[in-house]
Structure formats: structure tokens, C-alpha cells
Amino acid sequence: MDEKTEKLKRFIAESENIVFFGGAGVSTESGVPDFRSKDGLYNRRDVRFDAYSPEYLLSHTCLMNEPEVFFEFYRQKMDARKAKPNAAHLFLAKLEKTGKLKAIVTQNIDGLHQKAGSKNVYEIHGTTQRNYCMRCGKAYPPDYIYDNKEKIPRCDCGGIVRCDVTLYEEQLPTKAVDNAINAIKRADMLIIGGTSLTVYPAASYIGFFKGRHIAIINRDRLSYPLNEERDVEINRPIGEVFSNLEI
């Protein structure tokens, strides 16, 4: 185990209220593509959608004005049902069981933290694991949109059934955001993993942290200011790092 990983292990051992703040890099090791990297979803050319920007295809405007286009893109590009939790998800679920990890704040929408066994997960960008009718609010299971044979999935009442994902132009879910901020405020250690901290307002929430230790685990180095004595940054895949830790 290298010096930085040893340091991370020591910080975890001496902390009692840890919060994990994660992004797309947590799930890429499960085969779920991120959005903005060179191999990410936004850079994978598909002639069916060449006329649109990725941001538009995942926007409220597209859902309302061109629902057939929206749902075709959603079905083709956002289906992570076959993905399985990786070492990072499993480690965090185990850490939660010890009582040290109090909350996971995730920007991901794939539900893999819950599949790994984590209970206290705040999904600040929503989730593909829930669907609901835009007219009557009736809930539908995760497979409903993907398996529906109609181009536009509809409820028994005739309303459109949409995913419970925060689209561009929509506000983040208030309850999840409030819970996430409160958890970060109370934490004595914040682990930031698999995120470039470029997506706002989500990235701004780490500014509420006033605890002792920050640990950053990300493939690419971040420009976030750290204290060398109290903090640590490890630039490797997060699943690889957590695989080397025992708790």
C-alpha cells in the first residue's frame, strides 16, 4: 500500500462522521459511461442524433417539445440496467455498515449505490430507478420506459410517463439537496470521488464542509485547495483505490 493510500486509511480510521460525494467516475468501472470525457456519452457520435446537442436531448424542452426524440435517446443511451456495483460501491456499502459513513451524496442516476447495499443515499440529480406520470403522478417501475413498446410511454390516464431524473432546465430535488448539504455540514471527513467538480450547482455543495479531513480520489488531478497535513489526493481509479483498503 502506497503512502497516500495509507494516509487515506488512517483518516478513515480516525473519523466518525464520513460523507462521500461522488460523480460519474464512480460508475465508469461498472461500464456506465460518463458524460464529458473523450469516451463519454457526449462524445459518442450517433447519426440519429447529430442534429441535436446532448444537452438538448436531456433537457426539459426536448421532453416537452419533441418527446419521441427524447425517449429514443433515453432508451438508447441511458439504460444502465445491466450494470453491476463495482469495488467502490461495495466498499462504501461496507463502510456504511460500520457506522462511520453517514451519507452518500451522488450525482449519478444509475442506482448502483443502492444495488450495492447502501441505504443513506442522496441522489441530487434524481434516478432512472423511478418513473412517474407527469399528469397524475402515478409511480411506475424502472423498466417501464425501456420496455414500453410505444414511442412515448403513457400512463393509464393518458399522461406521459417520465424518468425521475433532473433534466437540463429543471431544478434539483429540494429534499435531496437539503439532506446532502446538512450531511456535509455535519461531517468530520469528506471523501470526494470520481468527479471533476465542474458540474454546478452540485459541486458547490462541498463548500459547506467544515470538518477535519478531505480526501479526493479521481483519475485526473483537481485544482481544489488541500492542506497537505490534513488532506489527501489520489489520482487513480476509485475502485482500484478502495480495493486496497480493509475496514
Image (spheres, helix red, strand yellow):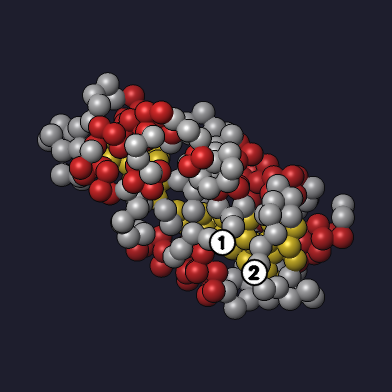
Q: Residue furthest bottom?
A: 210
Give me the residue at 87% from left, 52% from top.
1
Q: Front-most of 199 and 107?
A: 199
The image shows residue 147 at horizontal and vertical percentages of 33, 24
Residue linked to disc 1:
197
Q: Which amino acid does label 2 sit on?
A: Tyr
Q: Which amino acid does label 1 sit on?
A: Leu
**Does residue 101 show up?**
no
In the rendered image, the vertical position of residue 10 relative to residue 32, given as above or below: below
The image shows residue 181 at horizontal and vertical percentages of 47, 69
Give me the residue at 79% from left, 47% from top.
244
In the rendered image, the vertical position of residue 227 relative to residue 246, given as above or below: below
Give me the residue at 53% from left, 47% from top.
36
Residue linked to disc 2:
224
Q: Are marks 1 and 2 in contact (CB under 8 Å)?
A: yes
Q: Front-most of 211 and 49?
A: 49
- Alpha carbons under labels 1 and 2: distance apart: 9 Å
Q: Name the image quarter holding residue 187.
A: bottom right
Secondary structure under tag 2 reads loop
**Does residue 57 show up?**
yes
Other-residue count near label 1 (Cα within 10 Å), few / some / many at <14 / 14–19 / ≥20: some
